[in-house]
Image: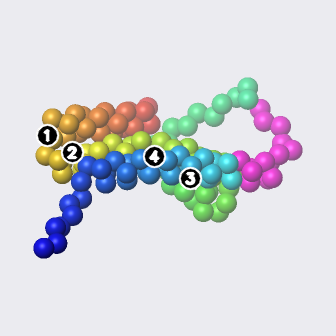
């Protein structure tokens, strides 16, 4: 008689650990490549840090601009893509934890994780609106 293996907590912990490990490496690699591309294209320019541009765009406009720039190989957009990937790594970890707690039927931690997700969503929403 063959015993059916269940997808358990240890499997989720392995997936979460790999997500954090590879997510950080991928995001840093993308940002590093973006930095090289940026320096190759703009390395001789002198930046003026006395004036910072006000940005009244919402998050979807910013992400669309970064995506379009990264597709065309713009160095600054690749750096921002790396930063966005670095930000998304722990967010995905929280989402995976939610599924792990649901499978374990640990409803206290499901509730806590949902509160954390709500805080993240609210923070992103209010952080990009003026």
How many residues crowd around disc 3 within 10 Å: few (fewer than 14), some, or many (20 or more)?
some
N-terminal of the two: label 4 or label 1? Answer: 4
Labels 4 & 2 near each other (Cβ < 8 A)? no
Q: In this view, does 50 lie to the left or right of 97?
A: right
Labels 3 & 2 near each other (Cβ < 8 A)? no
Q: Mark 1 points at which residue?
A: 107
Q: Quadrant of the C terminus?
A: top left
Q: In which quarter of the image is residue 70?
A: bottom right
In three-dimensional space, the C-alpha distance between marks 4 and 3, rounded to whole angstroms, equals 10 Å
Q: Mark 3 points at which residue?
A: 26
Q: Please give the name of the residue rendered at 43% of the width and 33% of the height, measured from the top-left corner.
A: 127
Q: Name the residue under label 2.
A: 101
Q: Is mark 3 on a helix, strand or loop?
A: helix
In three-dimensional space, the C-alpha distance between marks 4 and 2, rounded to whole angstroms, equals 18 Å
Q: Does the magenta stretch include residue 94?
A: no
x, y (%) of residue 99? Answer: 24, 50
Q: Provide the residue span drawn in magenta.
A: 35-48
24 or 5: which is nearer to us? 5
How many residues crowd around disc 4 within 10 Å: few (fewer than 14), some, or many (20 or more)?
some
Q: Please give the name of the residue rendered at 25% of the width and 38% of the height, measured from the top-left corner.
A: 113
Q: What element carries label 2?
A: helix
How many residues crowd around disc 2 within 10 Å: few (fewer than 14), some, or many (20 or more)?
some
N-terminal of the two: label 1 or label 2? Answer: 2
Q: Quadrant of residue 7?
A: bottom left
Q: Please give the name of the residue rendered at 15% of the width and 41% of the height, measured from the top-left corner.
A: 106
Q: In this view, does 8 lie to the left or right of 55?
A: left
N-terminal of the two: label 4 or label 3? Answer: 4
């Amino acid at each position: 008689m063959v015993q059916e293996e269940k997808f358990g907590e240890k499997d989720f912990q392995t997936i979460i650990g790999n997500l954090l490990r590879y997510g950080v490496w991928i995001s840093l690699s993308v940002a590093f490549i973006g930095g090289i591309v940026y320096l190759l294209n703009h390395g001789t320019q002198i930046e003026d840090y006395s004036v910072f541009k006000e940005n009244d765009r919402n998050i979807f406009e910013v992400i669309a601009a970064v995506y379009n720039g990264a597709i065309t190989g713009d160095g600054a957009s690749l750096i921002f893509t790396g930063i966005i990937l670095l930000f998304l790594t722990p967010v995905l970890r929280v989402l995976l934890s939610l599924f792990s707690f649901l499978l374990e039927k640990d409803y206290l931690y499901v509730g806590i994780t949902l509160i954390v997700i709500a805080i993240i969503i609210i923070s992103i929403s209010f952080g990009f609106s003026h």
